[in-house]
Image (cartoon, helix red, strand yellow):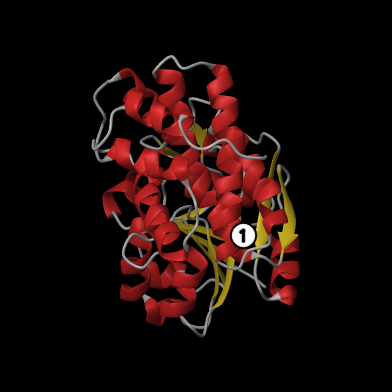
Amino acid sequence: MTGVAVLGAGAFGTALAISLSAVRNDVVLWARAKDQIAKMSLDRTNAKRLPNCHLPANLKLTSDLQRACAADIILISTPMQKLSEFAQENRTLLAGKILVSCCKGVDLETGQGPVELLERIVPDARIAILSGPSFAIDIAEGLPTALTIASKDEALVSDLQATLATNNIRLYSSLDPIGVEFGGALKNVMAIACGIAIGAGLGESARAALMTRGNIEMQRLASALGAHPKTLSGLSGFGDLVLTCTSTKSRNFSHGIKLGRGEPIDPSITVEGVATAHAAAKLAAQRGVDMPITNVVRDILNSSITINEAVELLLSRPLKRE
């Protein structure tokens, strides 16, 4: 397999392109905006998303999607709620390609994760997902990171594991893309919950409880959708949960902190867990899956309950065996 394109010059897409360029000379980073690509080409940095991180000289930049999609392997790093529209608009260019989703979330309209969504829209492509505990800045700066690459296609995932590993990204393989995609999506909801707890002054013990019981909720829903529960104990589940629930580098955790403190929210910042909370709560209701933390996060985001009411709801639930 030759030629790797990263579609989406946000922080994560740019970081992946930087890391891949350290070991490959055939990496292309695409962004829709011509002015953004022109500035990045001139400055050799993505000042808006990853300031102070140098773009390697061998990393090619383009706003020409057809040129980017000439690559054999296409990493899609668009926001989750834009993925369906993007795939629909460009299904001809994506047809027959190896597509690796780098999105974390659940589509609000369909309730699908990125793998199922891409399989539906581009049925003749070979689909995989890349996920796990990772901050873009860490990857871009060459810090060690472990991620999971998953696909139902065993030969594909084996090839991608070898092809996409870099000097600082260690890849583990999985044949459970459902578990990987929903682990990466649902942990964002729990990160918002933990941020709310910390922002509202509920304490570290409350955060630990939310992380632990939140991981159980993640396993319940993912299992109901066909995932293996063990996957949610791996990098793309528990690992990602720990990272996003404990660091202010996480946009979801930081969003929760602001909610907990009653501070204003910046609508220009994409927080994938907001849409995922609504989509996951709907999926859980359809499948008859008990997800109390997800439900109260959704209700807080909707302003239909207060934080104090959410705490009371969770603490007053019937006592049960762990």
Q: Is residue 305 left or right of residue 72?
A: left
Q: Position of residue 81 (x, y in %)?
A: 34, 57
Front-most of residues 200 and 23: 200
Total marks in image: 1
Residue neighbourhood size for the residue with mark 1, other residues' Cα within 10 Å, grouped as few (<14), some (14–19), many (≥20): many
Place residue 207 in its image quadrant: top right
**Would residue 57 be seen by someone viewing this image from the given angle?**
no
Q: Is residue 288 left or right of residue 135?
A: left
Q: Quadrant of the N terminus?
A: bottom right
Q: Which residue is mark 1?
A: 179
The amino acid at mark 1 is: Gly
Q: Looking at the image, which residue is at 28% across and 20% down?
A: 262
Q: Looking at the image, which residue is at 56% across and 49% down?
A: 218
Q: Position of residue 291 (x, y in %)?
A: 48, 48
In the rendered view, tell whether residue 73 sits above or below residue 53: below
Front-most of residues 297 and 265: 297
In the rendered view, tell whether residue 195 sits above or below residue 87: above
**Would residue 268 be seen by someone viewing this image from the given angle?**
yes
Badge 1 element: helix
